[in-house]
Image (cartoon, rainbow, N blue to C red):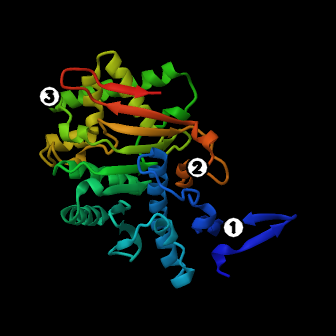
Amino acid sequence: MGRGSLRQMMGGGVVALDSDRDIFSISGPFHLTSIDWNNSYHRTSVASSLVNGVYILERDRQERRVGSGSLAMPWWDFFNFSLVETLIDDYDGSIYGAVIWTLINTLHHGSRSMHAIRAIRNVVDKHNHSAIWLAGHSLGAALVLLAGKTMTRFGYFLESYIFNPPISSIPLEQLPGGDMLKGMFQITKSVVKATVAIALTDLHVQEEDPKTASWIPYLYVNSADPICAGFIDYFKRKTFMSKIGASKIEKAGSGKSVRCLLLERKGKSSSSDLSTEPLHLLPSADMIVNKNKPTTSMTAHGLHQWWERDPTLRENWESCCIRPKSKGKLHQLTIQ
């Protein structure tokens, strides 16, 4: 019996070890025996399962689980996917991503972003881009944001599933104080940054790239997760600033950090360089907010929450549709 399948009996009950979370038949979305690809919950469950399989692929390597002892394969095999290629870090030999038929998951670290985007281009060159998914979790989600934006520059709008992406801002959702106080903080921040941005760019506010606006990734965040909760604040601010007719101020304030603006002023970076643009800057997205409170078995930052089997808990998922309108009109932003 492998370590992953071990149980401990306590007071007549069964306690699952942490390694049980690697076993698909115990912790995975095994209830989805028939996949409806037009069902957003089914697609979410499959994408998050495939991403989790890559995490387990690396744990298999670390713990030397091979052959029948390996635990990664069921996480994609159950849905009739096949592992085509693993992405291996040049420095430490760790597995940070994989090509599973036409789904890619990667983690952003050092040269990995270049390797991952190269792998994506190779897949796009060989297959119909409409059949390709990008998916990533946490730091891997950050790289999917970068890769997805990069591919739009070449005219490819890849279906993307972005789970718990990090955002470098204060998660106001978790701070004490009323909505008005939080809103004033964000407005003040936008106005200050916009003033600096306009001053450093000769009163020019860069328009959103229409190609990037046409890319609509699926974004999954948890309001109790400090790593990604800032996305909720970001889109709420866009909504409010649009309603009061201050979209240009918000756009100028969020487009680049002050440090990046100073670098551009000194000629050290290009205004079209994606590396100077905050990853969270998304004109369009379909965002799902999980408002369930985390438990010991379902953390706010974990992947397991995204294949939640209980439909009553899924009722606490809120859908947010972010779409820009045509030039000269306000953004159409709906956050339920």
Q: Which part of the image, by quadrant, shows the N terminus?
A: bottom right
Earlier-in-chain disc, 3 versus 2: 3
- Residue 40 in view here: yes
Residue 221's x, y, as percent?
A: 48, 43
Q: Amino acid at mark 2?
A: Glu
Residue 289's x, y, as percent?
A: 50, 38
Name the secondary structure under disc 3. loop
Q: Answer few, some or many: residues within 10 Å of disc 3's Cα (few below 14, many 20 plus, some between 14 and 19).
A: few
Judged from this view, the residue extending furthest toward the top is 244
Q: Which residue is mark 3?
A: 204
Earlier-in-chain disc, 1 versus 2: 1
Q: Which residue is mark 1?
A: 17
Number of disc labels: 3
In the displayed structure, 193 sits above or below 267; it is above
Q: Answer few, some or many: residues within 10 Å of disc 2's Cα (few below 14, many 20 plus, some between 14 and 19).
A: some
Q: Are marks 1 and 2 in contact (CB under 8 Å)?
A: no
Residue 42's x, y, as percent?
A: 48, 50
- Residue 275 in view here: no
